[in-house]
Each structure stands twice: as C-alpha cells, then as structure tokens.
Image: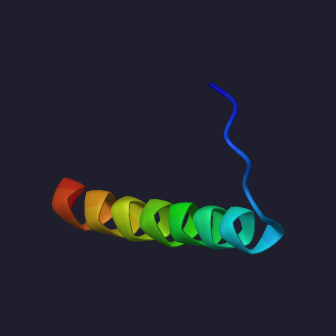
Amino acid sequence: MPTILSDSQIVIALFTALITGIFALRLGTELYK
C-alpha cells in the first residue's frame, strides 16, 4: 500500500517528531530527578 507524501507533509512530520522527542526527553529528565 504505497502512500504518496508531499515535501510539506514530510517536513511537518519530522518537525513534529523532533518537538515531541525534545518534550519527552525534558519531561523524562524532570521526572527522573
């Protein structure tokens, strides 16, 4: 099932993943303390 993604969708997906990762990392470090 091939899915065609536009460049904007790829950029948004990567940006969202990056922000989510940073937020999760900060939250994890705060909870670990």
Q: Which residue is the extreme one toward the right?
A: 7
Between 3 and 25, the one lying in front of the other is 3
In this rendered view, identify the residue nearer to me: 12 or 6.
6
Which image quadrant for residue 29?
A: bottom left
Name the side, left or right, on which 4 lies relative to 24.
right
Q: Name the image quarter holding the C terminus.
A: bottom left
Residue 12 at x, y = what percent? Answer: 63, 73
32 or 12: nearer the eye?
A: 12
**What kind of colouring is applied to the model shown?**
rainbow
Front residue of 10/22: it is 10
Q: Is residue 9 left or right of residue 19?
A: right
In the image, residue 19 above or below residue 3: below
Q: Position of residue 7 (x, y in %)?
A: 82, 67
Q: Is residue 12 above or below residue 29?
A: below
Q: Is residue 1 above or below residue 22?
A: above
Q: Quadrant of the N terminus?
A: top right
Residue at left offset 74%, top offset 75% = 8
State the image quarter where residue 17 is shown.
bottom right
Instruction: From the top left corner, tell me how far across and down residue 15 is, in percent.
Output: 62, 72
